[in-house]
Image (cartoon, grey):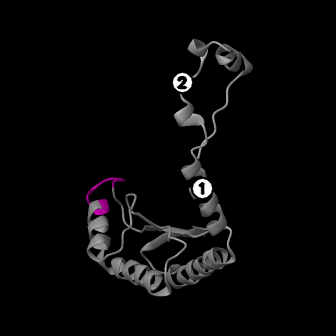
Amino acid sequence: MGLTTCSQKVYDAFYSDEIAKGLFHGHTYTANPLACTAALAAVELLTSSEIQEKIEWIIRSNVEFIKKLKDHPKVKNIRSKGVIMAFELGVETDRYGDLRNRIFKYFMDKGVFLRPLGNTIYIVPPYVISEVELRKVYDVIEGSLSEF
């Protein structure tokens, strides 16, 4: 979804009964009905009680996991905001160096698709994640602490 705005000067430049002055981008800017329907369905789903309860559950789960990790010697600056949880591994590395690649491979090999940023590990679980899936993410994170 998008919105296009302009100044009065730009609007006036295209406002005319002469077809040659028209802005021929109606296909781009005319509220595609299919896109609007999908956006409305997404908003309905996002605001549904089921998804809102799931979001709250993910937040609570992350808070509990943070309590478990906060005193680990390799965990630095652990934090969460909404469903996002992140921390730095207490090891030095270049932002896009070899450690980042090894961390990425470790998680991918375990079936957990995370994108580490240097030594920062973060998760943004989808709102439909199951308890088993989220537990797996946490377990793989815990296992990674002994690997790096």
* Residue ID at (31%, 67%): 103
Q: Position of 105 compared to 22: left or right?
A: left
Relative to 89, 125 lies left or right: right
The outermost residue toward the right is: 8
Q: Amino acid at mark 1?
A: Thr
Q: Quadrant of residue 13?
A: top right
Residue 34 position, x and y percent, is: 55, 51
The quadrant in which the C terminus is found is bottom left
Looking at this view, is 10 or 26 the one in front? 26
The residue to which callout 1 is attached is 37
CA gap between label 1 and label 2 equals 24 Å
Secondary structure category for the residue under label 2 = loop
The residue depicted at 50 percent of the width and 70 percent of the height is 126
Magenta residues, as a range? 94-100
**Relative side of 87 to 56, left or right:** left
Disc on the earlier residue, 1 or 2: 2
Residue at 46 percent of width and 73 percent of height: 75
Secondary structure beneath disc 1?
helix
Callout 2 amino acid: Phe
Residue 143 in the image, given as x and y percentages of width and height? 35, 82
Residue receiving disc 2? 24
Q: Nearer the viewer, residue 21 or 89?
A: 21
- The percent position of residue 118, horizontal first and vertical second, equals 37, 58
